[in-house]
Image (cartoon, helix red, strand yellow):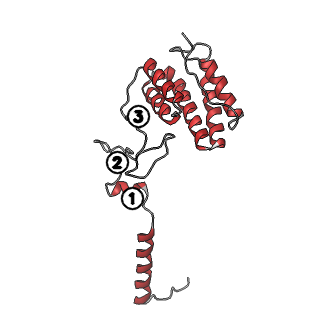
Amino acid sequence: MRDEPERTENQDEAAARAQDHADAARIPSSRDEAARGRRDRDEVGRPRNARPRDAYGRPLPHGATGIPTMPDDLDLEPAEALVEAQRLLDDDRPFHAHEVLEAVWKAAPEDERELWRGLAQVAVGVTHLRRGNLKGAQALLSRAADRLEPYKANPPHGIDVDGVVQQTRALADRPGGAAVDLVLTKAP
């Protein structure tokens, strides 16, 4: 075993100063912010993000004016959620439509969870399209269409699963060229 050279007091001080400098220059992570109590949390300590967002859900700097997001405790019946999600999609706010669909997904009965998850993924895929992330959009849209396929035979809540799957596959096949005009429910 080799003997380590003895460190001098000056070397120890220099190492400590270098570490202090590195720590001061480091960009804080969300863990650091949470540890210091700066991260938004609800009354039971779950993380919440109160940063403003743009129309496509991208976080903006604190203090900026953003587009209001959906409340964390959103609780809508499927019919209400479909109307709200469609309104948001029609207003070119797919990120917000995703939040509505995700809320239903998390509260849905087990036999419908994958349906709502797939619909939420469609909205996220459109969000990726709007943000210019074509590769991410293709992956999500393909996964969403696959997830929705089993519901085509007996779609609940008037959802046009077959139409949504067709539209979603068209977007996945041509993410830069297809118009985004999703319709979630069948016309009455």
Which mark identifies residue 40?
Answer: 2
Q: Closer to the camera, 92 or 136? A: 92
Q: Position of residue 2 (x, y in %)?
A: 55, 84
Q: Closer to the camera, 133 or 24? A: 133
Q: Position of residue 182 (x, y in %)?
A: 59, 25
In which quadrant will I find the C terminus? top right
Residue flagged by tag 1: what amino acid is it? Answer: Asp
Alpha-carbon span between mark 3 and mark 1:
27 Å
Q: Nearer the viewer, mark 3 or mark 1?
A: 3
Lower sequence index among marks 2 and 3 = 2
Mark 3: give few (<14), some (14-19) or many (20+) Cα within 10 Å.
Answer: some
Residue flagged by tag 2: what amino acid is it? Answer: Asp
Q: Is residue 136 above or below residue 14?
A: above
**Quarter-wise, where is residue 127 in the image?**
top right
Q: Closer to the camera, 121 or 178? A: 178
Mark 2: give few (<14), some (14-19) or many (20+) Cα within 10 Å.
Answer: some
Assign a secondary structure to mark 1: helix
Q: Position of residue 134 (x, y in %)?
A: 65, 42
Which mark identifies residue 70?
Answer: 3
Count of labels in the image: 3
Which residue was labeled with disc 1?
Answer: 32
In which quadrant will I find the N terminus? bottom right
Q: Is residue 110 above or below residue 15?
A: above
Residue flagged by tag 3: what amino acid is it? Answer: Met
